[in-house]
Image (tube, grey):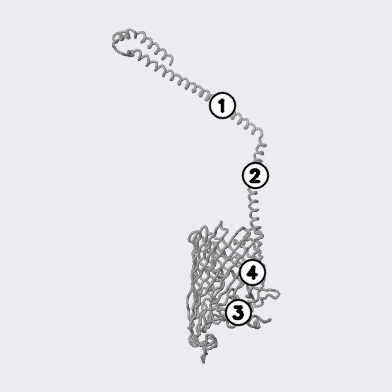
């Protein structure tokens, strides 16, 4: 088609060329007067035709290329159709051959098919058995090395440690590995010039925790005991028999709603915690000394506690706890009654005193945690009562009335308490814990390690709660998984509270003729005998003499301080338990309020008692 078009166009062009010359000559003749000769119409037409021929050639070339591509695609399509047809025929032939083979094989093929099915089922059973064996092995491993024992739907977790411990004190206090800080003797007394070395395994501890999980709560019980208790036949002579002592025994319901209810004997809510307000997460000093460190606030006593987990980082809690008034402090006090000896028939220790409590202690606390620390604030409310006998005996040195009786006795009540805060910050990937702890208030001596007096008495017999408090700075360095190093420095303080009584001193001495001062820390207390050794006296327990009570040593403790440094090293820690060893050094100092001494004889007005103590411990812990 395109060839015919070319021929037609060429013929037209030749016809135009043969007719053009006459017209061109005529035009040229008539336009000689024009400067530049213009193109004729025929020339212009020829140029246009040439352009069209060029474009037509280009179109023809593109058409040819497209035609070639079409032909090639058509060939490929035909080849693929042939291949598909051949594949269909091959598949049909294979199907026919398979059917023929199955018909020829008959029952044997059915047997083969059944055997294949059995093998497949056996393989599935083998896989299931392997899974069950693996599960059983894992359960066996948990039973062999697990941290709990499963008993009738309850998880039992035993704990505790066995300990071999010693203490070497510069000045004897008559104590095992727990130090009575407010009883450190002054240097001139018999016990103050004799050291003591004691050793025992009595701090060995046993514990058992039981957990029963319900859909909406966890029920939990915990028991803990050691042997730091003495019965009437306990001694260090031969059998060294000491009684089992209750440390903790409590029941708990931990609800998924965030509430936790706990009741029994436990660490007081005053105690610092490492996580929230959770039982068994108490931040106890790492000391070997079972009385811990001066300045540490704590109790282990009955309590009923309610805690609410408000947010993942915030807790609030309140508790009702057992009350007890420590010995009333001071000198020249009126005749009052606030405690009685224990009744053996009531299962109380007849050699210990128990105060007449009319209300429990009340404690509230809030705790907040961040990624780097744990912080607490708390308050303590306390209630005191005594029976006052205004016609009782008068202070020493005063003129005794003709008659002394219980006439006019009356009961007095007073309230006190305090506030406190604990802060613990973890640094360097939690390898270093820095802590600060404080408790201040009135009548709170019982809640700190030195157990300074809670109160003294006014001349009228009403109780005066002693203002004071305690503080503790702590550093615990967990340098490696095997080594812990710790250091603590703490102090406790009781403010003096003294009053003039209605009586005048008639005894010869520096206060003759002056009003007798009563209360705690009175500046007229005679303290000149605190450094003077006196003759021993027969022991009330029999068997020989014991140090006698110092005369003219009416000192009242102002403060007690202690600095402690120690470490724990673990030889082994794993699924078979923990074997560790530790050494602790402590320096304790007891200072008294200024009284009347004899500086000329080297007897200070403010007696001070110090003690240097070394502790060692070797322990095996059950696996944790």
Q: Mark 1 or mark 2: name the one nearer the start of the chain.
A: 1
Question: Where is the N terminus found, in terms of image quarters?
Answer: top left
Q: Nearer the viewer, residue 122 or 274?
A: 274
Task: Let me know if residue 344 appears in the view.
Answer: no
Badge 1: residue crowd in 10 Å (few <14, some 14–19, many ≥20) = few
Q: What label sits on residue 352 in the rendered view?
A: none
Q: Secondary structure at mark 4?
A: strand
Left or right, residue 419 beside residue 91: left
Q: Which residue is mark 2?
A: 123
Question: Where is the C terminus found, in terms of image quarters?
Answer: bottom right
The residues bearing labels 4 and 3 have C-alpha atoms spaced at a distance of 24 Å
Numbered disc total = 4
Looking at the image, which residue sits at the far right?
238
Q: Which residue is mark 3?
A: 531
Q: Which residue is mark 4?
A: 614
Q: Mark 2 or mark 4: name the one nearer the start of the chain.
A: 2
Residue 513 in percent (x, y) is at 50, 88
The residues bearing labels 1 and 4 have C-alpha atoms spaced at a distance of 98 Å
Q: Secondary structure at mark 2?
A: helix
Tell me if residue 385 comes above or below residue 312 in the rendering.
below
Task: Let me know if residue 91 appears in the view.
Answer: yes
- Is the C-beta separation of discs 1 and 2 under 8 Å? no
- Is the C-beta separation of discs 3 and 2 under 8 Å? no
Nearer the camera: disc 1 or disc 2: 1
Residue 216 in percent (x, y) is at 52, 60
Nearer the camera: disc 1 or disc 4: 4
Q: What label sits on residue 83 in the rendered view?
A: 1
Residue 236 in percent (x, y) is at 68, 75
Q: Mark 3 or mark 2: name the one nearer the start of the chain.
A: 2
């Amino acid at each position: 088609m395109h060839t015919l078009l070319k021929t037609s166009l060429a013929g037209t062009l030749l016809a135009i060329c043969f007719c053009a010359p006459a017209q061109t000559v005529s035009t040229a003749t008539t336009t000689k007067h024009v400067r530049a000769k213009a193109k004729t119409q025929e020339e212009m037409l020829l140029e246009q035709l040439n352009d069209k021929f060029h474009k037509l050639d280009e179109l023809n070339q593109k058409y040819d290329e497209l035609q070639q591509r079409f032909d090639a695609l058509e060939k490929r399509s035909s080849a693929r159709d042939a291949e598909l047809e051949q594949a269909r025929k091959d598949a049909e032939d294979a199907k026919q051959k398979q059917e023929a083979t199955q018909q020829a094989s008959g029952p044997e093929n059915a047997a083969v098919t059944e055997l294949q099915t059995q093998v497949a089922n056996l393989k599935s059973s083998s896989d299931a058995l392997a899974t069950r064996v693996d599960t059983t092995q894992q359960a066996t491993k948990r039973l062999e090395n697990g941290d709990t024992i499963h008993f009738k739907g309850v998880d039992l977790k035993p704990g505790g440690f066995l300990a071999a411990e010693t203490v070497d004190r510069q000045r004897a206090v008559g104590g095992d590995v727990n130090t009575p800080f407010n009883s450190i003797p002054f240097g001139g007394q018999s016990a103050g010039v004799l050291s003591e070395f004691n050793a025992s395994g009595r701090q060995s501890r046993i514990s058992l925790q039981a957990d029963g999980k319900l859909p909406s709560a966890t029920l939990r019980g915990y028991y803990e005991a050691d042997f730091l208790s003495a019965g009437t036949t306990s001694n260090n002579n031969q059998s060294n028999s000491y009684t089992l002592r209750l440390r903790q025994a409590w029941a708990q319901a931990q609800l998924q709603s965030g509430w936790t209810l706990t009741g029994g004997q436990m660490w007081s809510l005053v105690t610092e915690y490492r996580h929230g307000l959770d039982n068994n997460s108490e931040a106890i000093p790492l000391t070997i000394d079972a009385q811990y460190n001066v300045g540490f606030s704590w109790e282990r006593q009955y309590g009923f506690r309610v805690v609410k987990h408000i947010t993942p980082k915030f807790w609030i809690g309140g508790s009702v706890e057992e009350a007890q008034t420590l010995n009333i402090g001071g000198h020249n006090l009126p005749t009052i009654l606030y405690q009685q000896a224990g009744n053996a028939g009531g299962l109380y220790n007849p050699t210990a005193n128990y105060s007449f409590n009319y209300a429990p202690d009340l404690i509230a606390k809030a705790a907040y945690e961040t990624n780097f620390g744990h912080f607490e604030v708390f308050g303590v409310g306390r209630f005191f009562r005594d029976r006052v006998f205004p016609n009782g005996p008068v202070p020493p040195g005063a003129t005794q009335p003709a008659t002394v009786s219980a006439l006019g006795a009356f009961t007095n009540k007073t309230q006190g308490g305090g506030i406190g805060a604990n802060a613990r910050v973890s640094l360097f990937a939690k390898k270093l814990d820095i802590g600060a702890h404080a408790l201040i208030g009135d009548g709170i001596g019982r809640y700190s390690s030195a157990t300074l007096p809670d109160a003294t008495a006014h001349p009228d017999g009403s109780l005066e709660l002693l203002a004071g408090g305690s503080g503790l700075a702590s550093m615990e360095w967990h340098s490696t998984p095997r080594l812990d190093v710790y250091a603590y420095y703490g102090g406790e303080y009781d403010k003096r509270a003294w009053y003039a009584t209605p009586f005048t001193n008639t005894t010869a001495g520096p206060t003759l003729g002056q009003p007798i001062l009563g209360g705690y820390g009175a500046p007229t207390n005679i303290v000149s005998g605190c450094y003077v050794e006196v003759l021993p006296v027969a022991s009330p327990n029999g068997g020989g003499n014991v140090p006698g009570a110092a005369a003219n040593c009416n000192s009242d403790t102002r403060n007690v301080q202690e600095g402690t440094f120690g470490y724990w090293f673990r030889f082994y820690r794993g699924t078979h338990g923990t074997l560790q060893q530790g050494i602790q050094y402590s320096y304790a100092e007891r200072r008294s309020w200024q009284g009347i001494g004899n500086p000329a004889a080297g007897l200070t007005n403010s007696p001070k008692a110090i003690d240097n103590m070394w502790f060692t411990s070797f322990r095996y812990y059950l696996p944790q």
